[in-house]
Image (cartoon, helix red, strand yellow):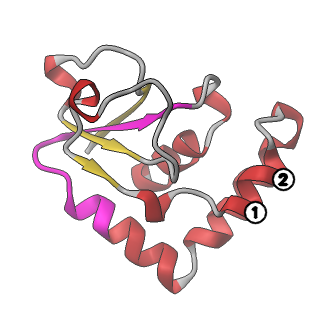
Amino acid sequence: MNIIVKRIQDDAAQNDGTRVLVDRIWPRGISKEDAQLDDWNKDVAPSDELRKWYGHDPEKFEEFAERYREELDSEEGGAALDALRGSVTGKRLTLLTATKDVDHSHAAVLKGLLSD
């Protein structure tokens, strides 16, 4: 499966494949119609506690990624990952997030996990 990460604020493209929002909170300023989503998987997002601890600080990214992978290694996390995989139709998955720095985001960690 080909997986890409995009900001939800970016325009949808024909080659996006299945578009899934992977944030726990709906992004400000985006209507559900404009998002052009196939799915919104809140359960695969990091816990509120982890998200708040991280605060999108790139210096904490490695530890954040490790803690996030541990969350996804739980029974609930595994079920959320299975649901995400099950929502994909076709050969491409676009993980959408409102995070400004997608390279240091949970979506980037998800991409790595799903690509393995």
Residue numbers of the magenta segment? 83-98
* 35 vs 108: above or below: above
114 vs 105, nearest the viewer? 105
Which residue is at 78% across, 51% downward? 52
* 35 vs 116: above or below: above
Horizontal side, residue 2 vs residue 4: left or right:
left
Horizontal side, residue 82 vs residue 74: left or right:
left
10 Å crowding of disc 1: few (<14), some (14-19), many (20+): few
Whether label 1 touches label 2, CB < 8 Å: yes
Give the residue furthest to the bottom: 75
Residue 25 coordinates in the image, percent (x, y)? 52, 48
Residue 27 coordinates in the image, percent (x, y)? 48, 35
Which residue is at 65% across, 63% downward? 47
What residue would you read off at disc 2?
53
Residue 33 coordinates in the image, percent (x, y)? 21, 30
Image quadrant assignment for residue 32: top left
Horizontal side, residue 65 vs residue 7: left or right:
right
Task: Give SS at disc 1.
Answer: helix
- Residue 87 among magenta residues: yes
- Residue 26 among magenta residues: no
Q: Residue 49 carries which label?
A: 1
The three-letter amino acid code for the residue at tag 2 is: Trp
